[in-house]
Image (spheres, helix red, strand yellow):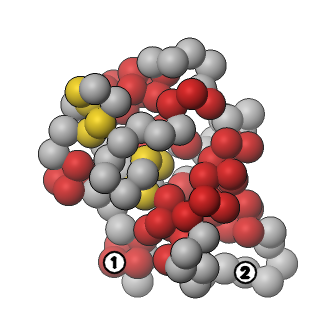
Amino acid sequence: MADKNHSFFEDVYEVVKLIPQGRVTSYGAIANYLGSKGSARMVGWAMNAAHSLSDVPAHRVVNRIGLLSGRHHFKTPTQMQDLLEVEGIRVENDQIVDFQKYFWDPSQELL
């Protein structure tokens, strides 16, 4: 859960670092886990700021229906998809195929 000594963005990054390779989560699932339900947009802002942090796998965070809504914040328009496909996640029309199969919910996984 959120640590009082960390900023919200740092807390988001700590959760994102725990997403296993080949899995994805949503902005809302991270916000909910951090006790900030309704702050999905703020998680998105944190992810936008994370692209300069090489240890934060921002490509594993998508919107609630599996859409690569953050793709425009990567170095190239296809980088997010390319990184996911390297991990075995199929993407068509900027959306993860079989999203629920790959969905990782920190509230369930990080008990």
Tell me the quarter of the image containing the C terminus: bottom left
Disc 1 marks which amino acid? Gln
Instruction: Report x, y in % for residue 17.
Output: 55, 54
Contact (CB < 8 A) between labels 2 and 1? no
Among numbered discs 2 and 1, the one appearing first in the sequence = 2
Which structural element holds mark 2? loop
Instruction: Report x, y in % for residue 22.
Output: 31, 43
Apparent side of residue 63 relative to residue 10 in the rendered image (left or right): left
In the picture of the structure, the residue carrying the numbered disc 1 is 108
Quarter holding residue 64: bottom left
> Is residue 56 in view from this perspective?
yes
Apparent side of residue 110 relative to residue 100 in the rendered image (left or right): right
> Is residue 20 in view from this perspective?
no
Q: Residues within 10 Å of mark 2 (few under 14, many from 20)?
A: few
- Of the pair 11 and 74, the residue shown nearer to us: 74
Instruction: Report x, y in % for residue 38.
Output: 55, 75
- Which residue is drawn at the image coordinates 60% and 70% (left, top)? 39
Tell me the quarter of the image containing the N terminus: bottom right
Quarter holding residue 41: bottom right
Disc 2 marks which amino acid? Asp
- Which residue is drawn at the image coordinates 61% and 52% (left, top)? 44
Instruction: Report x, y in % for residue 106.
Output: 42, 70
- Which residue is drawn at the image coordinates 60% and 79% (left, top)? 36
Tag shown at residue 69: none
Relative to 108, say whether 13 is above or below.
above
Q: Name the residue furthest right.
A: 5
Q: CA distance from mark 2 to mark 1?
A: 19 Å
In the picture of the structure, the residue carrying the numbered disc 2 is 3
